[in-house]
């Protein structure tokens, strides 16, 4: 591994994704960070960059196929490569089953299944 290796982490603005971002940066990887929450994402990138790592914040909603494709294109345009992808973004629906709608379930499937598959689809060629 050299300083040129690049990892892209979705769901990187908090929780496990954020923790992984710091860990990958400590291993010397350039870290592309994605999530829907731009302000939190920017804070993570600033903290990594100030600690000697290299991070790039790329807001991305994994329920939007164009956003996923654009995020990959931005990583390639910036660093010319993508070595590791951590498709960490996801969410759950909460509440009693009698109150959840098809829209609720479809949103969860879009994020946790389709979004993950499309993240891999667009990253894999690189």
Image: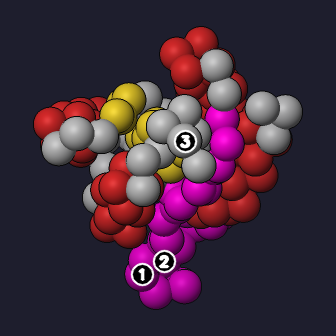
Q: Nearer the viewer, residue 13 or 93?
A: 13
Q: Is residue 94 magenta?
A: yes
Q: Is residue 59 above or below residue 105?
A: above
Residue hosting label 1:
95
**Where is the C terminus found, in terms of image quarters?**
top right
Q: Is residue 74 visible to us here?
A: no
Nearer to us of marks 1 and 2 is 1
Label 2 neighbourhood size at 10 Å, few (<14), some (14-19), many (20+)? few
Which SS does the magenta portion mostly show?
loop
The segment highlighted magenta reads 82-107
Residue 57 visible in the shown view:
yes
Of 106 and 119, the residue lying toward us: 119
Is residue 111 toward the left or the right of residue 93 in the image? Answer: right
Q: Is residue 31 magenta?
A: no
Q: Residues within 10 Å of mark 3 (few under 14, many from 20)?
A: few
Task: Indicate the secondary structure of the residue bearing disc 1.
Answer: loop
Q: Secondary structure at mark 2?
A: loop
Rate crowding at label 1 as few (under 14), some (14 to 19) or many (20 or more) other CA atoms within 10 Å.
few
Q: 46 above or below 80?
A: below
Using the image as rendered, state which of residue 33 and residue 80 is in the foreground: 80
Give percent across and percent down for residue 9.
50, 49
């Amino acid at each position: 591994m050299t300083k040129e290796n690049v990892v892209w982490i979705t769901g990187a603005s908090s929780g496990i994704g954020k923790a992984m971002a710091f860990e990958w940066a400590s291993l010397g990887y350039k870290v592309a960070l994605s999530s829907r929450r731009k302000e939190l994402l920017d804070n993570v990138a600033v903290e990594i960059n100030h600690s000697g790592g290299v991070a790039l914040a790329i807001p991305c909603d994994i329920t939007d196929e164009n956003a996923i494709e654009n995020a990959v294109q931005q990583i390639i345009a910036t660093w010319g490569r993508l070595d590791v992808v951590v498709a960490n973004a996801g969410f759950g629906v909460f509440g009693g089953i009698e109150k959840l709608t098809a829209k609720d379930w479809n949103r969860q499937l879009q994020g946790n299944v389709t979004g993950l598959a499309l993240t891999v689809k667009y990253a894999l060629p690189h």
